[in-house]
Image (cartoon, coloured by chain):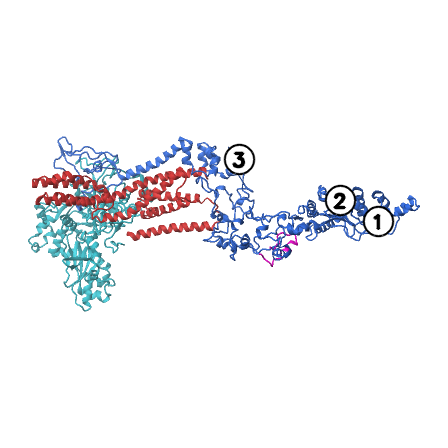
Chain colours: A blue, B cyan, C red
Amino acid sequence: MDPEKFRHDVSRYERPTERYRCGRGAEWRDPCAFGPNAKGQCGGTSDCRPAKVGDRYECRRPAFAGGPCAEGPKPDGACAHQRPPCRPRRTIRSLRGLIALSAFTLVIAIIATFLTVSQSSSRAVLSAGPLTGGHANFTAKSGCVACHEPHGADTGGWALAAFREDDLTARCITCHTFGGDPRLGHNAASDRSPRGREVQCTDCHTEHKGETFDIVKVGDEACNACHKQRVDSFGENHAAFKPSFPHDRRTSIMFDHVSHMAKHFADERVKTLAPANCASCHEMQGAETFVRPKSFDESCVGCHADVIATRELVLLRLPEFSESLLDKERVMEVCGPTLEQWQMMMESMSGDSDMATMRGMMTEETEYESVSSEEASAISAYLLGMPPDDPDDLTMQGFVWGLILEGEAPIAELIDARAGRKVSDRLLAGLNPELVRRVACAWAANIEYQPPNDPEFGGWYGDGLELKYRPPRANSHVDSVAYEWALFAAASAKEGDEALIDFAADMRNVVLGRTEGVGACTKCHAVSNDGEGGLTVEWRYAEAQSRPFTGFNHPRHLTLVDPEGVNLMNPDAGCRTCHKLNEAAQYQASFDGHDPHHFESNFSAISKETCAQCHNAGQVKQDCKTCHNYHLEPGFDLRMMSDAK
Amino acid sequence: MASVAFMARPQRWDAPFGPAMTDADVARLMTLPEIAAIKADNFPAHTPLADIVKNDTRLVRYEPGDIVVREGDYGNSAFLVISGKLRVVLAPDLPRATIGRQESRRKGFFEALAQVWTNRVMPEVRGAVRQTSQQVRAGDDLAGSRVVLQDVPAVLSRHKTAELGASALFGELAALGRVPRTATIFAEEPAELLEIRWQGLRELRKYDMGWRRLIDERYRENTLKVALRESSLFQGLSETELQEVADAVLFETYGGFDWNVSFKRMREQGSVAQEPVIAREGEYPDGVLMVRAGFARVAVKIGNGQRTLTYLGAGDLYGIDELWAARNGSEVSLQTSLSALGYVDVLRVPAPVLERFVFPKMQAPPRPLIEMAARPLSADAPMEWAVEQRFINGTKAMLIDLSLCVRCDDCVRACASTHGGNPRFIRHGRTFDHWMVTNACMHCADPVCMIGCPTGAIHRSIGSGTVVINDETCIGCGTCAGSCPYHNIRMVETRDGDGKLLRDPDSQRPIVKATKCDLCETSPGGPACVRACPHDALRRVDFRSESTFRSVR
Amino acid sequence: MTGERAITIRYMVVLGIFAAAIVAFTLHAIETPNQLGRPEFLTGYVMFGLMLGVALLNARKRLSMVPVGRAAYWLALHVLGGFLIIGLYFVHTQRIWPQGGFERAFAMLVYLVTASGIYGYVIQRFIPRRLTTSGIEIIYERIPAELARIRREAEEIALACTKEAGTDTLARHYLESLSWYFRRPRFFLGHVFALESGEHWVRFQVQTIERYLSEAERRHLAKLEALALYKDRIDFHFVGQSLLKYWLLVHVPLATALLAMMFWHIIVINVYAL
């Protein structure tokens, strides 16, 4: 710019705050010096407003427009320099403000239009995105209101909802079910819930992220939000596993892997029966966290079928009496004479003795000497409440008399009384009353019962001083009588009379004894405290319920490399990567007591380092959800689906 | 593109100070005792005493209450009382409003914020009332207007005053020394005064011993010792020693008092203004020169021209390097030249005085001026430009770095929003490299705009020294706008509250007011333009500062 | 302090403040357990605050009369705040391109506003330098008047030439070709890309006519050429300053539209998800 143009009388203040500019200038014609007024009208149709001084007009053109002009005003006082008015334009700045304001208004107008035109158009400005397939399906009919309650409200309620907390979780759990309160941490009623705050589904799960969005996928940050021990990397942050992990509870079956592998499977005699690898006994099919052992009939029966039938239950045993209190005559009347008496009778029949003489002879009081020198059975001791080594003769013999008269009924009565309910029919299933009577008659006659035949096939039988049960050989592993007796014993009295408690304990030792218990059940099935002072036999494979939120996918790990580089496809080698035998462990001793948590596994504990070999930074994935799950027993209420339709 | 208009070089006395002066007046004045005492023979033939009286003085009459000079005014004339009685206000000072000043009060935050809605879209709206202050008495022409004290008896009772009667001379220090007037003087009774403009005063001092003694003695008494005491050179001198120095010091003035006029004219003609030489390179120094007012250029010969090394302002010394070197054995002539940029008031301290009082106590002077010649020429180019354009006068010039400026006009809008919707500067101006000095008031060290304001509407604010214009007492004469050599004062046509242009009912001429940057004197937070620049492109600079042109690139 | 160092320091300061805020917040988030889920609400509201904050730059420009901090700081906050917003935006949405119709429009605006902002910032940093090299400086609003003056002068030269030389060769060429050039700013795109199209055109026109001109006429032609080249530099300024002004015509309206969408988004979120 020519410096001359800076002159104070030529260059006027530029006013960028003005909203209009000269229309002539905007068209690249010569703009006038005056410019538009504030209202946007042309301010320069003439160069000046001549002043009347005296009787003539004087030019008053300002300096910036060139000063007084040579022509001077016209005679009527009009300026000589007239122009047609221009059409002033907005300045860029004011245009910008106008457009900006319009843009704001336009957006609001568009939103308003979308809201009012139709449902689908209103959804376009309300919905954050399409729902996942499943959710989209079931909300197709009911629409947004299926989850968003305010959507159904009128405008006022809709607006008010902005200031109210929405309970979306309440809508979720109409279909989704959990093993506990869904608003508690991990759905479990524990004090571990996030402090002072309920958990909402939307804390972790977000919808409206597209049809194929993985709504279930949740990152570690969700876990770290609550857990004090922040885990960013399994290898670095995760706490070490418990020293006993994962063997913090006794197995339900006592199976000494060490002795079996080291000794028994190597035994020449059973070599053909020995399993080939872990999978021979453990069911890989369908396994995930837990790899169940295969059934007894698949795995154990080859070697251990016989042992069941060798372990008998002694129901009754004739104890030693100091004197016989039974009326021999009546016994004979009911039972008939014993063989001895019959012989005597035969002899006397051949003689001339009359009946009376004969009867007297038969019932003749000879010096009593008990045929038994044994103790009573632990069962009877418990049922009758008498010490087995010193039973009350009268009661005991009365009991025997009862057996003579009523068969097994007195036993059943006692059993039901002890159990507190009717269980005797199952405990005594297959017990022939006649057998009971015969055995009792023999005992009443102070003689050993002679079974008519060898009880080869098992079942109830009498033998000398004992009334016993032997599991039948066929169908051996599932013997209901032995099973019921084990249950009965396990549940036997644990409170009340102190003596009775002792008798019960004795009976349990017998029935549930590892070496002589009936059917050898407890040789393998662990007997554990039931937590209420009693015992329980672990019939079933026990899944560790203590870790509901932790899992391990065994099949996926199956083909892991054995550290020694053995056969990749050998599942056994794979197992051994983590499950290492611990030969020093006192495994069997763990089953001596009844505390399932006192346990020393055959296998060494698995440490975090084992997992961290692969699950570590830069290696295999290590996010929380790899091993842990959040929900407790997640389920789905199908009825809701039909309701929703 | 400027078309060059040739005109006769203006001659002295083309425009007499008082056009109304008649020969009878001159004859009467020549009989005044103070003038009659002058030996007319001492005056050269081309400037006879009578012509000086005729052309460089004028007769002015004051009615009671009329203010003759105001404290803080810059003036270019002295007054000789012919008749009547004046009063000089000694203590306390008159309230600033009564002498036509603006009461500079900073607005509070919310008061300033209120401008968001009080600012007008219409330019230059003033309230219809109080277009001009009641204090102003209109004169024959705009420049003849005066500020009037409303209640003289009250002023006399409340303030300590001294009487000035016939044959009293005052105002000569301000006129010759270019310093603000130190006191307010008003007429108590109708008075007739002879106003002598600085040119005439200088001739009188030059050619008449009586006037010279009168002026110099007063100067020595009032100003000299203060100036000496403030200089680092004379620190540690006792009162009597200082008196001896003061007695020996010579004072000289160079350049035209109204340098701005000639500078503007020269610049408009495209030529470089001639600068009176104060000291010449190669000559031998006879003393140290101390600049007391104005600016002087320090230059050395280079090639075909003079290279500016630096410029000196009030308090700066020249020649000390060479004298010190000479004292220490080496014989040294002046290494640099010194020339006056505009009007310069210089004190010459003779070498013997230095030798006796100063050098014995002095350490070596910090850095000889000549050392600056070692810098590359390009480093000094912006400074050379600033000197050439006389921007060195500015203490708060608006400097824009054009390589950062995005031309968003935020500074202008900020200025407008701080001043009722009206900008007070234009974002154009002279450029050099990527620097631009905009047409915004520079708040000059030597505010020539303040000379000749008839009502004192333009003045320095008392606290900050900012040059401001009191809109109420401004009568729109345009003297200041015409004086400013940088064209930084603009006359604006004012409007009433309805947005109609205000016009004088008689002449139909618009009511105009002088406007300019006031550095946001009344706003909280200092200059809004600086704050508003989002790109760090705009600064208010003192051209004397070293960092003015410090470019980081 | 002016200049680039000041700008760098300013940006560092603001960046430092932001970084400190982010670090403090992250530390706080790490130190505080039980901050379950919903980080998008937090990031969302932080973004809301930031967006209002950066939008305040516009308000700042209207509040110049009060000391509310230097605009340079506001701009630094605006620029860095904008970058922070786009960063937070990704954290907030976890995706580049959302699913819903509204969300897509919203995302589009976020990107456009950011992109236009970046574009604006970049041209603001280099166009001024380019303008400085033109050697002239002119206020944008005065360009029409200046062009009109140049045109007047050019026409006068053509007329004077005709009058002096008695032939209308130059005037004819002026009418045929040059008048097009002097009518308004020309070679907009050429100036955008700092090409010398205008200069080239002028030289070409001079070449075209020169051969037909007498010595006297050539003097006029030289004057006309100088004028044309001067006008080319004015054009250059017009283009540069236009670029500096017009980008805001995109950025600001988009930003206000974005603000409107943001308000609606927050309302919907509060009604449906909170």
Does the magenta segment cover residue A204?
Answer: no
What's under tag 1, amino acid-wise?
Ser
- Magenta stretch in the rendered image: A581-601
Q: Nearer the viewer, residue C175 or C157?
A: C175
Q: Which amino acid is tagged 3? A: Met
* Tag nearer the camera, 3 or 1: 1
Count of numbered circles in the view: 3
**At label 2, which amino acid type do we have?**
Ile
Q: Are marks 2 and 3 in contact (CB under 8 Å)?
A: no
Disc with the residue nearer the chain's start (3 vs 1)? 1
Q: Disc 2 and disc 1: Cα gap in Å?
A: 21 Å
Q: Secondary structure at mark 1?
A: loop
Q: Is residue A399 visible?
A: no
Q: Which residue is mark 1?
A: A324
Residue B2, percent from left and from top: 14, 45
Q: Quadrant of the C terminus of chain B?
A: bottom left
Badge 2 and badge 1 in a common chain: yes
Dot 2: chain letter: A
Q: Main secondary structure of the magenta part?
A: loop
Question: Image point 40% across, 31% down: which residue?
Answer: A116
Q: For the residues marked 3 and 1, what is the alpha-carbon distance in whole angstroms?
A: 75 Å
From the image, tell me which residue sits under label 3.
A640
